[in-house]
Image (cartoon, rainbow, N blue to C red):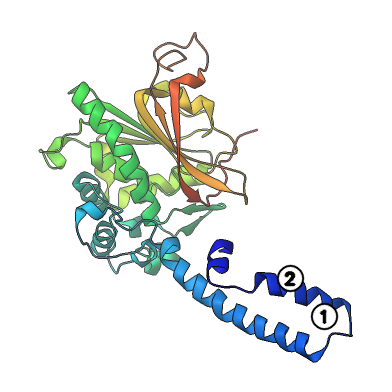
């Protein structure tokens, strides 16, 4: 904004010179006061113009900006609310947030209304986070869609490299169970999804440190997605998110639904080679970013395979994706 202000002739220099004199002294002449008032009025107008010119860049972060894709409807993340699940998902797709037909199909099969509190049902398809109790929230739909797009590539690669081998997904901080169920629809039996889907069948593990949320997840899934539990595709457990679920490691994909104060190494070593973890990192109430952590090496521990080498930082590539605001990842004492 400072650069834009200077380019627009914003009265930064005049304001800094005139204002202190008029604040500290009662001897400012009328010309100086008139100049100061004129500058302030001009500043207010220019500030409004600058802010409005900056607005598209602040709100179109999830819009399709690839010029090579040709013209597409401009749909901002905050405009992706809908009246129904399909309406909401269609808008996320129009916005270029949901790109893959695999992710779209899974999102269409899991209705968000089943995973919010009864008092929030009217807002279930709003593109915003909602409280689910116990100091936790269900993330905004555009954030879930973004996570799915980041975690689909390693699942596709693992399916191509090892056809027929079960995929494994860990959802840390499963909350109300929504995203865990969506992952379940992605890797459920091919008899229940498009047989043309290139993804192997798999298992999804949702863990949370809050017992009531684990039970809430099970209850919510049973409303319309109970077959995921019956088939064993999805399993919910009470676990410390910082420690993950080593009994089922290594995982092809890990999603962390709450902000870790530091990078959780115990989760990183539970990634399979080629696996990806999406995790928000940053202090509670401070600056947080969503990171994509890719496992590119096998020099260090791979939980479930070899746990004798310790943690090796060179095994991972870390990419900062975008700024976020999440509740903290709770750690058991």
- Which is more toward the observer, 293 or 60? 60
Q: Residue furthest bottom?
A: 30
Local SS, label 2: helix
Q: Residue placed at 63% from the left, 84% from the top? A: 41
Local SS, label 1: helix
Q: Residue placed at 62% from the left, 50% from the top? A: 286
Instruction: Report if residue 271 is visible in the image.
Output: yes
Q: Residue placed at 24% from the left, 40% from the top? A: 186
Whether tag 2 and tag 1 are in contact, CB under 8 A, the answer is: no
Question: What quarter of the picture does the C terminus occupy?
Answer: top right
139 horizontally vs 262: left or right: left
Q: Is 37 rendered above or below residue 69?
A: below
Q: Residue furthest top?
A: 308
**Residue 162 appears at what percent x and percent y?**
21, 21
**Which of pointers 2 and 1 lies earlier in the amino acid sequence?**
2
Q: Is 152 rendered above or below residue 325?
A: above
- Disc 2 to disc 1, how far (Cα)? 11 Å
**Disc assigned to residue 285:** none
**Residue 235 appears at what percent x and percent y?**
36, 35
**Residue 184 appears at what percent x and percent y?**
28, 40
- Can you identify the residue that label 1 sits on? 22
Q: Label 2: few (<14), some or many (≥20) within 10 Å? A: few
329 horizontally vs 11: left or right: left
Q: Name the image quarter holding residue 328.
A: top right
**Disc assigned to residue 16:** 2
């Amino acid at each position: 904004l400072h650069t834009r202000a200077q380019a627009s002739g914003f009265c930064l220099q005049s304001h800094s010179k005139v204002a202190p004199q008029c604040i500290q002294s009662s001897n400012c002449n009328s010309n100086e006061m008139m100049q100061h008032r004129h500058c302030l009025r001009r500043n207010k107008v220019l500030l409004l113009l600058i802010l409005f010119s900056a607005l598209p860049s602040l709100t179109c972060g999830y819009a399709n900006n690839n010029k090579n894709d040709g013209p597409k409807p401009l749909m901002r993340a905050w405009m992706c609310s809908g009246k129904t699940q399909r309406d909401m998902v269609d808008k996320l797709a129009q916005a270029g947030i949901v790109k893959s037909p695999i992710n779209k199909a899974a999102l269409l099969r899991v209705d968000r209304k089943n995973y919010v509190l009864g008092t929030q049902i009217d807002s279930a398809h709003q593109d915003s986070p909602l409280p689910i109790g116990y100091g936790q929230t269900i993330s905004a739909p555009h954030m879930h869609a973004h996570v799915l797009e980041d975690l689909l590539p390693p699942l596709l690669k693992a399916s191509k490299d090892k056809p027929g081998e079960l995929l494994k997904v860990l959802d840390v901080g499963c909350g109300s169970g929504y995203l865990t169920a969506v992952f379940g629809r992605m890797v459920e039996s091919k008899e229940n999804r498009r047989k043309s889907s290139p993804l192997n069948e798999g298992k999804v593990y949702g863990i949370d440190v809050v017992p009531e949320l684990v039970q809430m997840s099970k209850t919510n899934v049973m409303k319309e997605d109970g077959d995921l539990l019956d088939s064993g595709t999805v399993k919910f457990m009470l676990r410390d998110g910082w420690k993950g679920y080593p009994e089922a490691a290594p995982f092809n994909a890990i999603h962390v639904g709450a902000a870790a104060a530091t990078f959780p190494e115990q989760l990183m070593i539970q990634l399979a080679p080629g696996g990806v973890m999406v995790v928000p990192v940053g202090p509670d109430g401070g600056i947080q970013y969503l990171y994509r952590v890719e496992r590119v090496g096998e020099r260090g521990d791979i939980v479930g395979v070899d746990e004798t080498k310790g943690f090796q930082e060179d095994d991972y590539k870390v990419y900062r994706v975008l700024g976020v605001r999440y509740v903290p990842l709770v750690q058991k004492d």
